[in-house]
Image: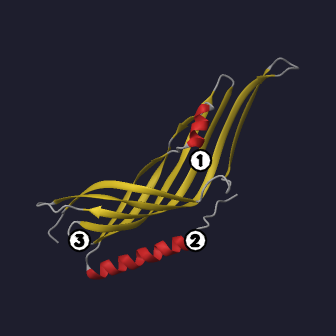
Amino acid sequence: MRTEPPFKFPVLLVLVFSASLIGATVARGQATVSVHAGGSFATWGGDDVKELEDAGFDIGYRTGVAVRASVVSPLTDLLGLQIGAAYVQKGASGEVDEDDFYLEFTTDMDYLEFPLLLRFSPPLEGPLSPHLAAGPAFSFVLNCRVSNRFRASYIDPFTDETVMVDDDESEECEEDVFKTFDFGVMAGAGLAFTVSPS
């Protein structure tokens, strides 16, 4: 079953708000536009994960990609508003490996993310310009898929032979198990440098 985000109006509202700010700042020639690409390392936390760990699961990370575009609109000499959009791959993995039992799962969740950050840029002499940014991020699930691999062995009571079971399956996430909206807080630091006088 495909997970469809029920928050279509907030997504539209964020896009319209972002586009209006981008248009206004570009028109005044004050915007700084940037594009970022890199890796994403995500996992889960909370009481549910603690229960899985108590049951013997080793919870790990899901590695993926993150592609972002953002616009910074100056508010004062020190502060600016950084808005943007991103495609981020998140999720988690886990496994339990006992003597005669092995179970491995991977949950792949792809998000459309909208950060709204306040950016602090102290003015410095020279070509380097450091900055700090922090604020909320609103994430909406684009798709979600769970993959499982189950392997076990047991003794057949009739033949006394060891029987191996090895099964792989993959399916869409259940809507009532996984949330389609995620709210978080982002923080980061960066260093810009001038490449030409213009």
Residue 55 horizontal/vertical position (percent): 63, 32
Dot 2 or dot 3, earlier in sequence:
2
Q: Nearer the viewer, residue 63 or 80?
A: 80
Foreground disc of the pair 2, 1: 2
- Mark number, residue 8: 2
Extreme left residue here?
125
Residue type at mark 2 is Lys
Q: Nearer the viewer, mark 2 or mark 3?
A: 3
Q: How is the image coloured?
A: secondary structure
Q: Residue at x 66, y 38 (%)?
A: 149
First along the sequence among labels 2 and 1: 2
Tell me which corner region of the image, top left, top right, bottom left or bottom right, holds residue 8: bottom right
Residue 114: where, in percent of width, then height? Answer: 45, 65
Q: Indicate left or right for 36 with 154 as reference.
A: left
Q: For the view shown, which residue lies furthest in the front direction?
A: 47
**Label 1 neighbourhood size at 10 Å, few (<14), some (14-19), many (20+)?**
many
Q: Dot 1 corresponds to which residue? A: 107
Mark 3 Cα shell of 10 Å, populated few (<14), some (14-19), many (≥20): few
Q: Which residue is mark 3?
A: 76
Helix, strand or loop at disc 2?
Answer: helix
- Gap in Å between the C-alphas at discs 3 and 1? 43 Å
Mark 3 falls on what kind of element?
loop
